[in-house]
Amino acid sequence: MNEWMNIVLATLVALLPITNPVSTAALFMSITGERDKQERRQQAFKASVYAFAILIAFLITGTLIMEFFGISIPGLRIAGGIMVIRVAFSMLKADTQQIEPDEKRAAKRKDDVSFTPLAMPSLSGPGAIAVTIGLAAGTERYIDFTAIILGILIVVLAAYLTLAAADKILKVLGKMGINALSKIMGFLLLAVGIQFLINGIIAIVTDLEFMTRVLESIQRVS
C-alpha cells in the first residue's frame, strides 16, 4: 500500500509543476474573460477531460511507442529530462506564456478553446506527455498503473478547480503572485528533470553489456 501511494505522490510531483494550472488560469482568463461564468466553467471542464484523455492515452500506449521507435528507457529518461529542464527554465524566467500573441488572438475568436490552446499545449503538452511515458516505462505491475491514473486524475481535477475559479485566483494573486508561484513550480520541475537525467545516465553506465560494446568500439578506433 505504501509503495502504491508513493507512485501516486511521484506522479503528482512530476506532473503538477509541468501542467502549472495557475499559469494556465492566467491564459484562460485572457482568452475567455469576456464570456460568462457558466461558459468558462464548461470550457474548463472540457479542457480537463481532454487533458486527462491525452495523458491516459500516452500512459497506455507509451511502451508500444517506445518499442515501435526502438527507444530505450534510459534514452527516454534522458530526453524527457532535457525537455522538462527546458520547460523549468522558462518557468524560472517567468516566461509562462505557452502560446504566441497571434495564437491568443485567434483563440479569442474561437467558440471552443478547450482542446487548443487549453488542453494542448497548456495542460498536456509535450513535457507532460514525456513525463507520462516515462512513468509508464518504469511501471511493470497493473496495480501500479492504477496509481499513476489516480495521480493524473488528481492533477487534472486540480487543473479544473483552478480554471473554474480563475477569476478569483487572479484577483487574489495578481500577476506578481502568479509569476512567483510559477517560479516555485519551475524550481520543483527543474529538480524532477535533473532526476530524470541522473536516472537515465545511471541506467546507461550500469548497463554492463552497453558499456562493454562502448569499450570495444573505442579499442577498435584506437
Image: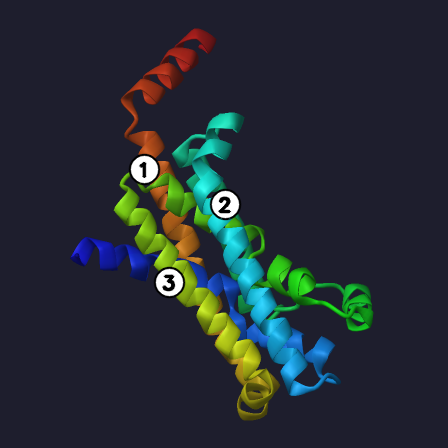
- Tell us which disc is closer to us: 3 or 2: 2
Amino acid type shown at disc 2: Phe
Q: Residue at x 54, y 66 (%)?
A: 48
Q: Residue at x 64, y 86 (%)?
A: 37
Amino acid type shown at disc 1: Ile
Locate the C terminus by quadrant.
Answer: top left
The residue to which callout 2 is attached is 58
The residue to which callout 1 is attached is 202
- Tell us which disc is closer to us: 1 or 2: 2
Identify the element where label 1 is drawn. Answer: helix
Q: Crowdedness of circle 3 by 10 Å Cα count: few (<14), some, many (20+)?
A: some
Identify whether 44 is placed above or below 135.
below
Tell me where residue 100 sits by quadrant: bottom right
Amino acid type shown at disc 3: Leu
Can residue 210 be seen by looking at this rendering? yes
Identify the element where label 2 is drawn. Answer: helix
The residue to which callout 3 is attached is 12
